[in-house]
Amino acid sequence: MRRGRPGLPDQVEMVLYDLAIVGGGPAGLTLAERAAAGGARVCVLDPRTPWEKPCGGGLSPRAAELFPFLAAPDTGSVETDQARLVSPHGLGVTIAGGKPFLVVSRLELARRLLDRATQAGAEHVPCRVASVVRERSQHCDCPRH
């Protein structure tokens, strides 16, 4: 990844990453944490993470199992035995299961995931990605490059 463009002042540096993730949502931040923990140089490109989201952070029982740290008392999470999904037109369905659903603020979810990713070594770069240009790299021994 290049910070800046050719012709800018000398303090603009070239930064190389093994992995650049566009988007700091739950999937991107989880990938960032895992890749950085495995030794990869990782950056997450997202100008607004962490953020609150109106739909909240309702997690299915399976998702709650994947993120057990979100059930900690200091997250403000709440367990419930059912979830009601309602469309913009007012149509709804209630889902009940044997295992509890976990409800946590989407802002808290994003904060925790970002903290875990950066603690593992990933870098958060708060910028908007407008385009991606693939360049041949001298650092890559992949036969496709």
Image: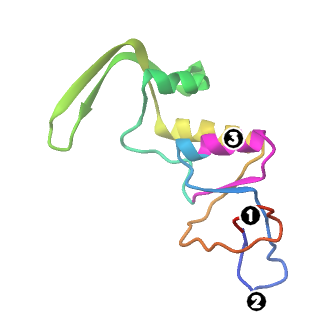
| Mark 3 residue element | helix
Residue 122 to residue 108: above or below:
below
How many C-alpha atoms fall within 10 Å of the one at disc 3: few (<14), some, or many (≥20)?
many
Residue 99 position, x and y percent, is 42, 13
Q: Quadrant of residue 13?
A: bottom right
Q: Mark 2 points at which residue?
A: 7
Where disc 1 sits, the SS reads: loop
Which region shows up in magenta? 29-46
Describe the element under mark 2 as helix, strand or loop.
loop
Earlier-in-chain disc, 2 versus 1: 2
Distance (Cα) linking label 2 and label 3: 34 Å
From this viewpoint, is residue 70 visible?
no
Locate residue 34 relative to residue 121 in the image: left or right. left
Q: Residue type at mark 1?
A: Pro
The residue to which callout 1 is attached is 143
Pointers 2 and 1 in contact (C-beta within 8 Å): no
Residue for point 51% across, 24% down = 64
* In the displayed structure image, the side of residue 138 where residue 86 appears, left or right: left
Q: Nearer the viewer, mark 2 or mark 3?
A: 3
Q: Closer to the observer: label 2 or label 1?
A: 1
Which residue, as the protein is rendered here, is positioned at the far top?
98
Vertical arrangement, residue 4 with respect to residue 124, above or below: below
Residue 65 visible in image: yes
Q: Name the residue under label 3.
A: 33
Cα separation between marks 2 and 1: 32 Å
